[in-house]
């Protein structure tokens, strides 16, 4: 049963990835260094997200907000938890992922609206 929940998590991850692609595609046309900025930002988020270090190391520390406010942690958790525990992730993880999708959808819509008329001139 956990694999079904993991597929749902992968679907949510795909939606977030598509929205990020839409945002950065429009930004990259206007600002050419966006790819480098995004790669540096993703590298920082990789080290902040508990991927290579255990999340329990910050649970009782004053930096535990780093985990809870990190949307990449929740995206990782909706895939990792069902695969490891054969049960769905916590509802707060799905809620944060859905809120992330809503926020990214709004930003992608605004960027598309803003740049759609000027994209031919910027290329």
Image: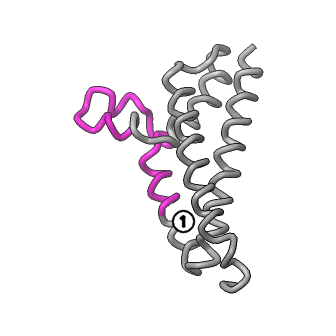
Q: Residue at x 65, y 63 (%)?
A: 112
Write the start and end of the magenta stretch as one range. Answer: 41-67
Q: Quadrant of residue 15?
A: top right
Image height of 64 relative to 31, above or below: above
Position of the C terminus by quadrant: bottom right
Task: From the viewer's perspective, tell me whether residue 108 is left or right of residue 52.
Answer: right
Image height of 4 relative to 71, above or below: above
Q: Residue at x 58, y 37 (%)?
A: 75
Q: Residue 32: horizontal and vertical position, in percent?
A: 59, 81
Q: Residue 62: horizontal and vertical position, in percent?
A: 22, 35
Structure colour scheme: one colour
Q: Quadrant of residue 82?
A: top right
Image height of 23 relative to 60, above or below: below
Q: Residue 100: horizontal and vertical position, in percent?
A: 54, 41
- Secondary structure beneath dot 1 equals helix
Work out which residue is located at the far left of the displayed protein and give it.
62
Q: Residue 65: horizontal and vertical position, in percent?
A: 32, 36
Viewer-proximal residue among 2 and 100: 100
Instruction: Say how many tags the image has.
Output: 1
Task: From the viewer's perspective, tell me whether residue 44 is left or right of residue 35.
Answer: left
Magenta segment: does it hold 63?
Answer: yes
Q: Residue at x 71, y 27 (%)?
A: 6
Viewer-proximal residue among 74 and 116: 116
Q: Residue at x 62, y 55 (%)?
A: 109
Mark 1 closeness class: few <14, some 14–19, many ≥20 residues within 10 Å: few
Position of the N terminus by quadrant: top right
Q: What residue sits right under mark 1 in the picture?
A: 38
Magenta segment: does it hold 103?
Answer: no
């Amino acid at each position: 049963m956990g694999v079904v929940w993991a597929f749902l998590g992968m679907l949510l991850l795909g939606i977030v990835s598509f929205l990020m692609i839409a945002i950065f595609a429009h930004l990259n046309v206007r600002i050419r260094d966006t790819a480098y900025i995004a790669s540096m930002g993703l590298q920082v988020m990789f080290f902040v997200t508990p991927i290579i270090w255990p999340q329990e190391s910050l649970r009782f520390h004053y930096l535990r907000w780093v985990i809870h406010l990190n949307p990449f942690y929740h995206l990782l958790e909706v895939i990792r938890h069902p695969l490891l525990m054969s049960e769905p992730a916590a509802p707060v993880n799905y809620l944060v992922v859905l809120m992330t999708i809503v926020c990214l959808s709004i930003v992608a819509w605004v960027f598309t609206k803003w740049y759609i008329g000027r994209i031919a001139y910027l290329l």
